[in-house]
Amino acid sequence: MKSAYLLLVLGLALIVVGHGMGLFVAPSEAAMGETGRILYVHVPTAWTAMVVFTIAFVAALGGLWTGRMGWDALIEASAEVGVVFTALLLVQGAVWAKPTWGVYWTWDPRLTTSAILLVLFGVVLLLRHVIEVPERRLTLSAVATIVAFADVPIVYFSVRWWNSLHQAQSTPQTVSKLMWQPLVISIFGTMFLGLALVIARWRIAREHYEREDAAPDLPDLPDQIELSDEPASGGQEVRG
Amino acid sequence: MSELLHLFRKDLLIEWRSRSHGFALACFALTLLLLFSFAIGPDTKTMSLHAGAYLWMSLLLSSTLLLARSFQVEVEDGAIETLILAPASATRMFYAKALANAVQLAILAAVAVPAVYALYGVQLHGEVGGGHRLGQLVSVVALGAAGLAAPGTLYAALTARLHARQLLLPLLLFPLVVPCLLAAVKATTLIVRPSLSEAEFTSWLALLACFDVLYWSVCGILFGRVIEQ
Amino acid sequence: MSGTPAISRSEAGDASAPSGEVVVEARGLSRRFGKRWAFARVDLTVRRSERWLILGANGSGKTTLLRALATAISPSLGRLRLFGQDPREDLAAARRRLALLSHRTGFYEDLTARDNLRVLARLAGHPDADLGAVLDRVGLEDRPDPVRAFSMGMRKRLALAAVIVQRPELVFLDEPFAALDPAGMEDVAALVRGLEGTVIVASHQVERAAALCDRALLMDAGLPRWTGPAHQAWMAWKAVQAPLAAAAGGAP
């Protein structure tokens, strides 16, 4: 838990520095003006979401391989934090899109991929909710996580091709050097924040498992029944 | 190999013996096609432009019923356990079932395509992009049906014994097959429109093929873990 | 009960039991679902051609135990050896040699009896099996209607045909007498007597099942309480029930 606090403090500090530099030091974005500064929030959120989903994928592989319930808790923690960050990503995308394109939603490939990602992993959480036996929950949600994660690149490419027929790519311009520094600092800050949340949530999930679902101690073997009035035909007497 | 064929034959035989269900499913798909036209209105030109989308949405919505049923017959009397203990290999069980589901989806498409042709006034004859339109449509339908069948079969097995299975199967499947659906719709639309951009068509087919290869392998590996108890 | 630690009858009986190849060996076998132990600490040694009865009340864990022994579910703890090997090492090989008649009969409802048997015969590696003869043996006609239309008695017969067609060395029968009329029970009993190889029956119909078996294991609340010769099973059963009856209000 100490590592979670350390990451949290470090992450928040980096976010303050990164965002401060982004707001007050970096030049305004050439094409988008001052609104472009949402970049320092948006890009780190996207990176963090991807990293956290990758953790979920690794946890799913580990869970299927070993069957240990610690992985199950990590799937829950990382999928949940990932879903939160993806939801934030969509909100930021809408905030950015409104002044830039005049609408809250565009079918930009990254935005669309994020929306699909949100649904894919949201359903994994839903699935976990309806399975009561912990071991089954681990297996099935790990399978769903792996299948969903494998979809991410292919979703991205398909949406990009689909979209490229309608409008030009909305990729941010190549980032100038003065903007590069706050961006990297913000990315690390947000990622540390995300990891701190995953660790904290992981701990809660493990505690929940220990409290609700962990294996109870094996019951003691009760006294064996002795049939003294009619000795077993082939067996020996039970000696007292 | 013979075990795979044997299981595949078993899956198709079950559907043949309960073919009234299959007939009802075809009616469902056709009804959907009829209903979609009301969403756009009687403008023939717009409708022919969206015909590919209607075809695949109709197949996708019907597929969840088909897929769910393909495992309902396995769990209703516990037949799948008899199979597992017989023993049938989980991998072969998966490929037999996915293949049977893909074949049924393709048959459903074969029923739906004439309806799309009649209802939406699309072009189905003549050469386009160096091949016959129908021939190219067959390849898109085959790849698309395979793309829906592989993850669909895995998720049908995964949800077969859960309480909220009617809801969970489409919830799991629909976002997952977005690339497959997108590629199939785009490729179909390119075929049935008067002109075809061959490069674009090929890239969509390639995407479909990638999706198929990815999920026919991943789901085959994971299936054994899903059915174990 | 005496205060001295009791000795399990299975250990006591081993010395004088007819020596033969050990087909099933369970040590400390346990399975839990979530927080509940379905069964725990089961020791069992079954030798070739023995007939075992696992008896217990509803919810005593006997069905789950039987399914774990038959590799239909995996145990959470403990050691299981089938035919002298850990079944997990080669699951298919172990499963090829055993058959389980489950509580649910395990058929495709839309297929005919013959179709269902054919599926199993081919998977078990006997594509040449004479299915007509097997159906005849269990007293079923070779009819064209689907299993869905079968009565419970017919299903049980067909389930036994499914066991026979797999030609197993080791047979697990879960409640073979459930939902049968007296005549059906007699027929099923005759069929079970006719089975070759090692047979393990789980049932709460103590007297009827004990008549088919030589040895018995009594399960109570998921734990083994008695192991001994099958003809004493009824007395052991009574002994388990007695404290319950007493607690219920001093029944005579």
Image (cartoon, grey):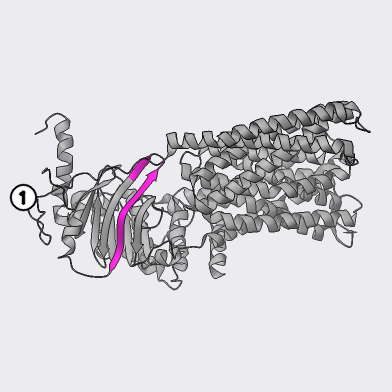
- Left or right, B35 with reference to C171: right
- Tell me where the magenta segment starts and ends, as one range: C22-38
On the image, the x and y values in percent for residue B101 come to 62, 54
Chain letter of disc 1 in the image: A
- Left or right, A114 with reference to A7: right
Of all residues, the one furthest to the right in this rendering is A30
On the image, the x and y values in percent for residue C184 come to 27, 53
- Image position of B181 with respect to C15: above or below: above
Which residue shows up at 22% across the image and 44% down it? A222
On the image, the x and y values in percent for residue A72 come to 53, 43
- Residue at disc 1, secondary structure: loop
Magenta-drawn stretch, dominant element (helix, strand or loop): strand
Q: Is residue A214 visible?
A: yes
Q: Nearer the viewer, residue C26 or B152?
A: C26
- Image position of B52 with respect to A19: above or below: below
Residue underneath mark 1: A229
Picture quadrant of residue A173: top right
